[in-house]
Structures are given as C-alpha cells and as structure tokens.
Amino acid sequence: MIPGSFDYHRPSSIDEAVGLLSDHGGDALILAGGHSLIPMMKLRMATPEHLIDIQGIDELSGIRVTGDRIEIGAAVTQADLIASDELAAACPILRETSYQIADPQIRNVGTIGGNVANGDPGNDMPAIMQLLDAEYVLRGKTGSRTVKAREFYEAAYFTARDEAEILTSVHIPTPAAGHGYSYQKQKRKIGDYATAAAGVILTVSGGQCTSASIALTNVADTPLWAEAAAQALVGTGLDTAAIAAAVDAARSITDPASDGRGPAEYRTHVAGIMVQRAIETAHERAA
Ligand code: FAD
C-alpha cells in the first residue's frame, strides 16, 4: 500500500514544530522514527496532510541521569537507550525492555517519544513508564505541562496529549539503588508485539519486600499499572502465597481482545505467568 500525499516539514526547533502543529490543526502529525506512523499511513488508517519531521531538532535528544532523576529527550532511539551504560546502571529495566522491542533495524530509528505518544497498547514502553511513575513533558503554544504516564492513556490511540502539543521529554524518578527489576514478554516470534507482558520493580530489606510496582502491556486498551497487585507483595517475604495473590490481582484488571495472539482467556492466563516470572526474577536481582 502507498500512503496518501502530504506536505513534508522539517523544523529545527521545538517552537517551530509547535507553530506548525498549531497552524495545521488536526491535519498535521509528528513524524519521529516513523515505524508506527508510516505503516498506519500505508494502511490509510492515518491520513495526515502535513508531516512534521522532528529528527532535525537537537533539543529533543540526550539522556541525562542526575542523582534522583532521569531525563530522556523524545527523539532518543531505542538503540540509544540500550547503548547508555549510565542509564542501564541507574534504571536497568529500560535496557532490558528496549532489547525486547522489534528488531535492531527498528530500534535504530524508533524513538522513546514515538513509542509512548503513539497510544498503541502493544507498545512496550508505556507500561514501563507507568511502572516507574514517569512524567511526560508536553509543549504547546502556551508553554509546557507535565502529565503522569499513569494518567496519560485514555483508550487505544487516545491519550491526554492535545493534537497541537509535542511530547518533548520523559522524566523518571531514579529507582532506589539495589532495586530488583524484570520485564517479561511473551510473543509469538522475535520482533512481535506482546501476547502479554509484565514489568516489575521492587526493593527488599531484611528479607521483606519494602516497595513494589507492577505494570502490564497489551492486555487491555491501555497499559495497566497494577497497583493492587504490587501492594499484595509489600510487607511479605515474596513467598508463594504473596506471589499468587499478586498474580490474581493483576489478572483481575486485564481485559485483552481475542485476536491473532490468542483468545482473551489465554492472554489473561499468560499475563499472570509473566507477572509471576517478573516478580521472581526481580526478587533474585534485588540487592
Ligand atoms: P512514529 O512512528 O514516528 O510516531 C508514532 C506516533 O506518535 C505518531 O502518531 C506520531 O505522530 C506520534 N509522535 C511521535 N513522536 C511524537 C512526539 N515527540 N510528540 C508527539 N507525538 C509524537 N514497538 C514496541 O513497543 N514493541 C514491539 O514489539 C514493536 N514491534 C514492532 C515491530 C515492527 C515490525 C514494527 C514496524 C514496529 C514495531 N514497534 C514495536 C513499534 C516501534 O517501536 C516504533 O518505532 C515506535 O512505536 C514508535 O516510535 P517512532 O519513533 O517510530 O514513532
């Protein structure tokens, strides 16, 4: 399939990109890596009249790790996330998740901004951002605002981003030193979206779980932050009963579609297995 025709713009600043978005209203879309948008355009599920390519905007690049905060520019690619040793030391689940997205060619151009702004429940980074309690910085004509990842996703392809706003960066509170982490993803083949996936971070002290966060990918219209599931772990020794309670709580909030990845019951079942494996692996890794 061939996309419809469009005008191509390549701004060199965020302000210029925001101006173009405002001028063209709902007829314009941001083009980042293009690995979600171009396939949608080929299928004519997206028919923008204007494409605003943000790859020439230097302000959108860069990873900054400070003591208590991580800032990632929207144009940082999945390959950049994998390559940063500083990022992997502070928040290793970002590297682990990036390695499970698509294949090296796609990771070389697919961006963190595109992955989290897209709104596709199959994207892996939105659940990770909910897990880490990240905030997205959105810039519009009247300035910037931040929206928590846990409040950003409204339905499949519907988010809290206004059509005239550009997502400029992602801010993540640095997880506690020595935390355990794991992203477990069941997929039909290498490069596929998840049948179901789960991320876990947790801390352990004196044999007891002192904090936990759990999130799920592709088992509902939006990513799911599984708050009750995580709470089922806190104050326990991460024993079999506590893990089973967390798995049950996580499964209870899923609502997957029956599709080529399997019937809904199967995908809910797999989600529970991913949660269990992610908790066990995170526990093993916790210092
Ligand atoms: P684009 O495709 O350029 O944009 C995606 C959407 O976000 C568009 O609507 C665009 O307008 C909007 N957008 C982009 N950047 C911004 C911004 N800064 N501000 C506001 N709006 C913006 N992803 C996964 O997570 N897991 C997978 O397993 C996976 N498998 C894939 C397999 C294949 C074969 C392919 C082709 C893609 C796969 N992807 C997967 C998607 C890939 O990771 C995309 O690169 C990513 O989802 C979107 O990033 P992008 O930079 O390519 O964004």
Image (cartoon, rainbow, N blue to C red):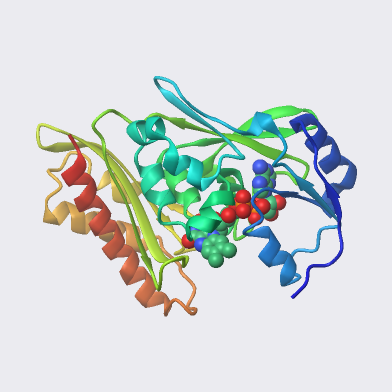
Please, is residue 264 above or below residue 246 in the view?
below
Q: Residue sitting at 50 percent across and 41 percent down? A: 80
Q: Which of 182 and 267 is in front in this view?
A: 182
Q: Where does the image place residue 87, in percent across and percent down from the top left?
A: 40, 33
Q: Quarter holding the C terminus?
A: top left
Q: Residue sitting at 61 percent across and 40 percent down? A: 75
Q: Relative to residue 173, is residue 235 drawn left or right?
A: left
Q: Quarter holding the N terminus?
A: bottom right
Instruction: Determine the quadrant in which ligand 1 lies.
Output: bottom right
The quadrant where residue 112 appears: top right
Q: Where does the image place residue 151, in percent across and percent down from the top left?
A: 55, 43
Please, is residue 270 above or below residue 215 in the view?
below
Q: Nearer the viewer, residue 109 or 149?
A: 109
Q: Relative to residue 75, is residue 90 drawn left or right?
A: left
Residue 176 is at least partly visible in this image:
yes
How many discs appear? 0
Q: Where does the image place residue 100, in percent across and percent down from the top left?
A: 41, 56
Residue 45 is at least partly visible in this image:
no
Q: Relative to residue 55, is residue 223 drawn left or right?
A: left
Q: Relative to residue 237, is residue 184 drawn left or right?
A: right
Please, is residue 216 above or below residue 66 in the view?
below
Q: Where does the image place residue 198, in percent across and percent down from the top left?
A: 36, 56
Q: Which of 274 and 150 is in front in this view?
A: 274
